[in-house]
């Protein structure tokens, strides 16, 4: 089967400074890869390279096609990307903001159809924001904005989602609801999910595979229970933590105060 996403020796960076190098990975259609690692490891840069926002060398293939061969519009049909700190244009209502996700689907006259509007409504309902549709984006709380950003990406209706820290600023219930929603899209529609996630317990509960990045390089990859060890958390995060297990064997990472 063709992988939904394949990275082959990818290097990327900014103005000559390479911050990610030698990254190879593959995600099957309907899979979930969580890119984890300490601050500054290069996780966001890697997502931006896949999304076409940062120059890279090596190969990145989405559904069997090299991303460099895709036009902007084709890329927007294939890849939905939600940045960690999105720009929120002044004065835009939540509905108008989420409608931006439909832009790649609009015709030459760029007027949205009833279908576009109903997709936007459905996307807002999915992230529990139906009641705030008419509010201005800037007046939303941080967590509400985060959910609106996800609604915009959902409205784009792509088979591959790249989400940079999608649970930042969300309370535990909304974070769980969002991850459950992504998991449902994955299982029911075969959507492929790639997220960066700082919460390693959430990462371990939802992702099929983890890619642990440190200093711009992959230092471990595989099933969460293989990747997450107390030793690695110490080495790569300088963290004192224990890796416990839920009843079904999934890792739970809990910090413990150094004695
Ligand atoms: N626009 C930029 N120009 C120059 N350097 C950058 C730029 N963006 C990021 N960097 C640098 O690249 C490195 C990797 O940053 P990146 O944002 O990819 O890390 P990250 O793993 O996502 O970190 P975090 O967990 O803190 O979000 C860091 O050293 C950062 O300072």
Image: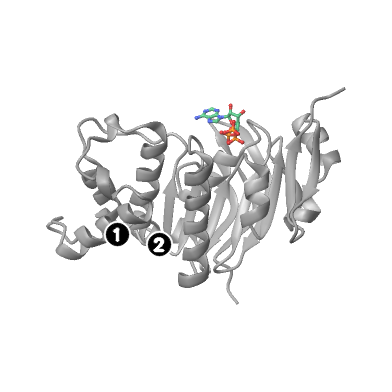
Is residue 211 something one can see in this rendering?
Answer: yes
The foreground one among 6 and 198 is: 198
Name which residue lies at 53% across and 46% down: 47
The residue carrying pointer 2 sits among few (fewer than 14), some (14 to 19) or many (20 or more) residues within 10 Å by Cα, namely some
- Percent from the top left, x then y, of residue 23? 67, 49
Is 239 situated above or below 131? above
> Toward the viewer: 84 or 179?
179
Instruction: Classify mark 1: residues with Cα within 10 Å, few (<14), some (14-19) or many (20+).
Output: some
Q: On the image, numbered disc 2 is attached to which residue? A: 158
Rounded to the nearest whole Å, what is the CA distance between mark 2 and mark 1? 15 Å
Ligand 1 image-quadrant field: top right
Q: Residue 213, located in which quarter of the rendered image?
A: top right
The residue that label 1 is drawn on is 122
Disc 1 element: helix
Residue 191's place in the image compared with 253, above or below, is below
Sequence-wise, which precedes: disc 2 or disc 1? 1
Most foreground residue, 32 or 181? 181
Q: Nearer the viewer, mark 2 or mark 1?
A: 1
**Disc 2 residue lies near ligand 1 with CB under 8 A:** no
Viewer-nearest residue: 52 or 79: 79
Relative to residue 54, is residue 179 depicted above or below?
Answer: below
> Could you tell me residue 191's position as x and y percent?
48, 65
């Amino acid at each position: 089967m063709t992988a939904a996403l394949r990275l082959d020796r990818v290097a990327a960076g900014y103005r000559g400074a390479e911050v990610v190098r030698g990254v190879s990975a593959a995600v099957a259609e309907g899979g979930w890869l969580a890119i984890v690692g300490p601050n500054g490891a290069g996780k966001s840069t890697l997502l931006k390279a896949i999304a076409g926002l940062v120059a890279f060398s090596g190969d990145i293939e989405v559904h069997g096609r090299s991303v460099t061969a895709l036009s902007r519009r084709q890329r927007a049909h294939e890849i939905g990307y939600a940045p960690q700190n999105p720009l929120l244009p002044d004065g835009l209502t939540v509905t108008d903001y989420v409608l931006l996700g439909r832009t790649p689907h609009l015709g030459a006259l760029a007027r949205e159809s009833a279908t576009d509007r109903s997709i936007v409504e459905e996307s807002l309902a999915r992230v529990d924001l139906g009641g705030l549709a008419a509010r201005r984006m800037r007046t939303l709380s941080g967590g509400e904005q985060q959910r609106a950003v996800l609604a915009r990406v959902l409205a784009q209706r792509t088979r591959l989602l790249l989400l940079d820290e999608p649970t930042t600023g969300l309370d535990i219930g909304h974070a769980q609801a969002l991850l459950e929603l992504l998991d449902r899209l994955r299982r029911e529609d075969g959507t492929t999910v790639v997220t960066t996630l700082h919460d390693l317990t959430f990462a371990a509960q939802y992702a099929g595979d983890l890619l642990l990045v440190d200093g711009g390089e992959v230092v471990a990859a595989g099933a969460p229970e293989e990747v997450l060890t107390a030793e690695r958390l110490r080495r790569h995060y300088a963290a004192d933590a224990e890796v416990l297990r839920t009843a079904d064997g999934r890792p739970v990472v809990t910090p413990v105060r150094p004695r």
